[in-house]
Image (cartoon, rainbow, N blue to C red):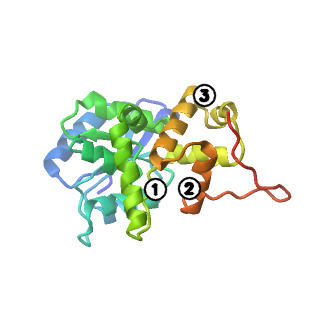
C-alpha cells in the first residue's frame, strides 16, 4: 500500500505527498509524473478513503492529492469522502483531481481544497500546484478572484444550507482561515504577512476572497460570521481582552 523511494534532494526540501486514487490506470500515470519530480516524496499511494486515513495518521504528509471520484467504503458521497480527508489531515494541503469544469471548482472549495487539477491537465500543472500549496499558497484564489460568478455560487450554496436548516459548509481554504484568525486577533495586513511569511498583497487577495465567499462587506463582519458558524474560535490570552478586527 505505502511506497517510498530515494532521492538526491536534501530531506528538508522534500514535499511529503499522499495520493488517493482508485484507478490503477490513472495511478500509473500519476506515479510516473511524481517520480520525475525530485522535490516530491511519494510517501504513500492508496486506493480508498479508509486506507488514506490510516496512512495519513502515520505519515503526516504536507500535501494530500485525491481524486474527487474516490468512493468511501461505506458508499459515502465522493464529496463527503474527500471532506473526511480534510478533517483528518488539517495540517496538510488538499489538492483534488477533478473534471476541470466550474462545478468542480465549487466542489473543491466546499471540501476545503487549496488547489485543484483537471484530470486532463499537463503534468507540469499537477506538479506546480502541489509545490504551490506546499508553500502555503492557495491557487484556487487566483481563479476565484477572476470569476465572481463562481464566488456567487459558493455564497448561494452556503446560504441555501442555512435556509434548509443544515450546517453550512465552511467555504474558506486553510490559508484563508489562517488569515481570518490573524484578523480576529487584531493584526493588520503587514503583521499578518510577516506572521504567515507571505506578501502583503497576498494577504489582501486572501481577504478579498474571504469577503466574497462569506458575502460580507468588511473584515470585522467576516470574523463575526465565521465565529458564529463555528469556523473560527477567538481565544484571548490569559489576562487579555478579546481583540476586534482592525482595518489595514
Please, is residue 202 above or below residue 104 in the view? above
Q: Quadrant of the N terminus?
A: bottom left
Q: Residue furthest right?
A: 239
Q: Secondary structure at mark 3?
A: helix
Q: Earlier in the sequence, mark 3 or mark 2?
A: 3
- Give the residue pinned by disc 3: 200
- Give the residue pinned by disc 1: 170
Q: Is 192 displayed left or right of 90 in the figure? A: right
Q: Secondary structure at mark 1?
A: loop
Q: Between residues 142 and 82, which one lies in front from this camera angle?
A: 142
Contact (CB < 8 A) between labels 3 and 1?
A: no
Q: Is residue 161 visible?
A: yes
Please provide percent x and percent y for residue 150: 33, 42
- Mark number for residue 226? 2
Q: Is 127 displayed left or right of 244 in the figure? A: left
Label 3 and label 2: CA atoms lie apart by 22 Å
Q: Nearer the viewer, mark 3 or mark 2?
A: 2
Which of the 4 quarters of the picture holds residue 142?
A: top left
Q: Residues within 10 Å of mark 3 (few under 14, many from 20)?
A: some
Label 2 and label 1: CA atoms lie apart by 8 Å
Q: Residue at x 43, y 33 (%)?
A: 132
Q: Secondary structure at mark 2?
A: helix
Please provide percent x and percent y for residue 20: 29, 53
Q: Residues within 10 Å of mark 1 (few under 14, many from 20)?
A: some
Label 3 and label 1: CA atoms lie apart by 24 Å
Amino acid at each position: 500500500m505505502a511506497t517510498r523511494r530515494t532521492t538526491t534532494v536534501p530531506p528538508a526540501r522534500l514535499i511529503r505527498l499522499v495520493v488517493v486514487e482508485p484507478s490503477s490506470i490513472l495511478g500509473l500515470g500519476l506515479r510516473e509524473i511524481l517520480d520525475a519530480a525530485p522535490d516530491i516524496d511519494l510517501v504513500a499511494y492508496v486506493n480508498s478513503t479508509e486506507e488514506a486515513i490510516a496512512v495519513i495518521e502515520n505519515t503526516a504528509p504536507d500535501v494530500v492529492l485525491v481524486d474527487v471520484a474516490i468512493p468511501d467504503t461505506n458508499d459515502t458521497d465522493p464529496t463527503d469522502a474527500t471532506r473526511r480527508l480534510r478533517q483528518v489531515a488539517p495540517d496538510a494541503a488538499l489538492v483534488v483531481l477533478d473534471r476541470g469544469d466550474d462545478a468542480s471548482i465549487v466542489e473543491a472549495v466546499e471540501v476545503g481544497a487549496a488547489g485543484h487539477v483537471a484530470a486532463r491537465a499537463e503534468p507540469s500543472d499537477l506538479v506546480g500546484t502541489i509545490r504551490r500549496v506546499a508553500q502555503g499558497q492557495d491557487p484556487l484564489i487566483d481563479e476565484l478572484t477572476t470569476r465572481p460568478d463562481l464566488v456567487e455560487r459558493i455564497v448561494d450554496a452556503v446560504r441555501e444550507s442555512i435556509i434548509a436548516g443544515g450546517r453550512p459548509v465552511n467555504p474558506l481554504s486553510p490559508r484563508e482561515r489562517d488569515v481570518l484568525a490573524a484578523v480576529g486577533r487584531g493584526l493588520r495586513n503587514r503583521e499578518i504577512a510577516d506572521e504567515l511569511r507571505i506578501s502583503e498583497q497576498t494577504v489582501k487577495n486572501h481577504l478579498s476572497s474571504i469577503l466574497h465567499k462569506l458575502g460580507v462587506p468588511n473584515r470585522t463582519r467576516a470574523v463575526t460570521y465565521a465565529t458564529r458558524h463555528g469556523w473560527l474560535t477567538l481565544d484571548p490570552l490569559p489576562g487579555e481582552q478579546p481583540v476586534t478586527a482592525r482595518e489595514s
